[in-house]
C-alpha cells in the first residue's frame, strides 16, 4: 500500500513564525502536491512538484514556498505565518500521467495564533 | 472556467436509499473526472473515475453518470450504508501533462441507520 506520511497531525504556531510542514511518500512517485482544505472551499492546490528540485505554482501559492531536495520528501514552507493560513493541509503523491490516482496523507491541522 | 461546481453541500439519506451528488464544469479541456471519498480524520482516497468517452461507469454500488453535452457528471451510491458516511469530492483535470486536479467544494453525506 502507498503510504504518504505527514510529520504532524496538529500544529500550533504564532503569527510571523516560519513554519515547515513535511511530507514523505514511500512509492517512488514522481509527482507530489500540497493542498489546503477549508470548509465550503474544497481542496485548493498550493504547489506541486513533478521531479526533484522542480516545482510549479498551484492556484493559491501566495505566502507559501516549497522544497523538494529528495524524491520522497516534499516540504511546504510558510515564510511568515498569518492567521488566514489556519487550515488543514494535505499532501499527496502520484505517478506521472493526468489520470493517475493521487494518494493523500491524513493531513496536518495548522492553527496560527 | 477552472471551477467545478458541486451540490448539494450536505446530504442525509436513509440506509438502503440512493445518494446522488452532482457536479458541473465549464472547461471543455477537462477529460478526466475522478471522485474522492474522505472519512473524518483521513485524507481523501480515489473512489471511482471516468473519462468522457463513456456515459456511465459502475463499480459495485458506486456509479458515475456523465453528460458531456451538459458538462455535468454525478455520483450515485446505491443501497447506501452507514459506512458510506463521508465527504465526497468530485474533481476534473485535463490532459496537459501535469496532473492538476480541480476539486469541487465537497458533499458531506450522512447515511442514517
Image: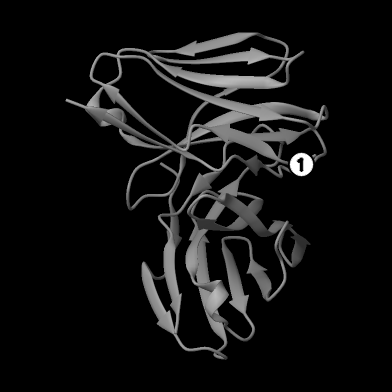
Tag count: 1
Q: Where is residue B48 in the image (x, y as percent from the top left)?
A: 51, 24
Residue that appears at 36% across and 14% down: B18
Quadrant in the picture for residue B62: top left
Residue underneath mark 1: B2
Q: Which residue lies furthest to the left in this view?
A: B113
Split into 4 quadrants, where in the image is the N terminus of chain B? top right
Residue that appears at 67% across and 31% down: A99
Split into 4 quadrants, where in the image is the C terminus of chain B? top left
Q: Where is residue A78 in the image (x, y as percent from the top left)?
A: 60, 79
- In the depicted structure, whether residue A46 falls above or below residue B37: below
Q: Which residue lies furthest to the top in this view?
A: B55
Residue that appears at 67% across and 42% down: B102
- In the depicted structure, whether residue B53 falls above or below residue A93: above
In this view, the residue in front, A74 or B91, is B91
Q: Position of residue A83 (x, y in %)?
A: 53, 79
- In the depicted structure, whether residue A84 falls above or below residue A38: below
In the image: residue A33, left or right of residue B82: right
Q: How is the image coloured?
A: one colour
Indicate the chain on which mark 1 is placed.
Answer: B
Q: 10 Å neighbourhood of mark 1: few (<14), some, or many (≥20)?
A: some
In this view, the residue in front, A50 or B29, is B29
Secondary element type, mark 1? loop
- In the depicted structure, whether residue A98 falls above or below residue A53: above
In the image: residue A72, left or right of residue B96: left
Residue that appears at 82% across and 38% down: B96
In the image: residue B38, left or right of residue B56: left
In this view, the residue in front, A96 or B23, is B23
In the image: residue B41, left or right of residue B59: left
Q: Where is residue B38 in the image (x, y as percent from the top left)?
A: 41, 42
Amino acid at each position: 500500500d502507498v503510504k504518504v506520511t505527514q510529520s504532524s497531525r496538529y500544529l500550533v504556531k504564532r503569527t510571523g513564525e516560519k513554519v515547515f510542514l513535511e511530507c514523505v511518500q514511500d512509492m517512488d512517485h514522481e509527482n507530489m502536491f500540497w493542498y489546503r482544505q477549508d470548509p465550503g472551499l474544497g481542496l485548493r492546490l498550493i504547489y506541486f512538484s513533478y521531479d526533484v528540485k522542480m516545482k510549479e505554482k498551484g492556484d493559491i501559492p501566495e505566502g507559501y514556498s516549497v522544497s523538494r531536495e529528495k524524491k520522497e520528501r516534499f516540504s511546504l514552507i510558510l515564510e511568515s505565518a498569518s492567521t488566514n493560513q489556519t487550515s488543514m493541509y494535505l499532501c499527496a503523491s502520484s505517478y506521472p500521467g493526468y489520470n493517475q490516482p493521487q494518494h493523500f496523507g491524513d493531513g496536518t491541522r495548522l492553527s496560527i495564533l | 472556467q477552472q471551477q467545478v461546481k458541486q451540490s448539494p453541500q450536505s446530504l442525509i439519506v436513509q440506509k438502503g436509499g440512493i445518494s446522488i451528488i452532482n457536479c458541473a464544469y465549464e472547461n471543455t479541456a477537462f477529460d478526466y473526472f475522478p471522485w474522492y471519498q474522505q472519512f473524518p480524520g483521513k485524507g481523501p482516497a480515489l473512489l471511482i473515475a471516468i473519462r468522457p468517452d463513456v456515459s456511465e461507469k459502475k463499480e459495485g454500488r458506486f456509479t458515475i453518470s456523465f453528460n458531456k453535452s451538459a458538462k455535468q457528471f454525478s455520483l450515485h451510491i446505491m443501497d447506501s450504508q452507514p459506512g458510506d458516511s463521508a465527504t465526497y469530492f468530485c474533481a476534473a483535470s485535463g490532459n496537459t501533462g501535469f496532473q492538476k486536479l480541480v476539486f469541487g467544494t465537497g458533499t458531506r453525506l450522512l447515511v442514517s441507520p
